[in-house]
Image (tube, grey):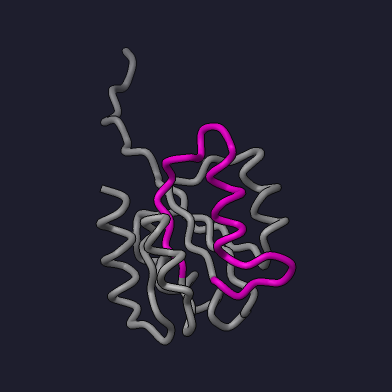
Amino acid sequence: MAEHKPQQQEVKTILVVEDDADIADILLCTFEETPYKVIVVGDGSQALKIVATIKPHLFLLDYYLPAMNGLQLYDQLHSIKGLEDIPTIIMSANLPENKIQQRKITYLKKPFELNDILQMVTTLLK
């Protein structure tokens, strides 16, 4: 007799692109107690490699990154077929708010409260 298991909900993946190891660690710890799987990379080129094999449900991007900034990365990620509608949060102490608002991106100013980021993520992933 086959055992019937309740269907599990899909685990949603968050791709965090953050070059500051301390902030990356804080974010990893913050999401430990959540139903989300978090992948952290340190720059845009690593993020672009990851999305070739994994389709995240949310991008959490630092604005100041090596080689390309968070907006440039956002534009590249959202130009990839299948990733155009992935919700994104950009975080930084200094953001070009007009450029972010033109793209209708959710943003978070550093320093931020961890509860704020959890609430934003939960809202965007509903």
Q: Is residue 21 above or below residue 13?
A: below
Toward the viewer: 35 or 105?
105
Q: Is residue 81 above or below residue 62?
A: above
Q: State the residue at coordinates (37%, 82%).
A: 112
Q: Is residue 62 above or below residue 15?
A: below
Q: Position of residue 20 (x, y in %)?
A: 62, 79
Q: State the residue at coordinates (40%, 47%).
A: 12
Q: Residue furthest top?
A: 1
Q: Position of residue 95 (x, y in %)?
A: 47, 77
Q: Is residue 44 magenta?
A: no
Toward the viewer: 38 or 57?
57
Q: Is residue 70 magenta?
A: yes
Q: State the residue at coordinates (38%, 68%).
A: 107
Compared across the picture, whether 118 is left or right of 59 comes to: left
The quadrant of the picture occupied by the N terminus is top left
Residue extent of the magenta highlight = 63-90
Q: Position of residue 93 (x, y in %)?
A: 47, 84
Q: State the residue at coordinates (51%, 39%).
A: 83
Q: Position of residue 25 (x, y in %)?
A: 54, 76
In this rendering, the count of numbered labels is: 0
Compared across the picture, whether 36 is left or right of 22 comes to: left
Compared across the picture, whether 71 is left or right of 100 comes to: right
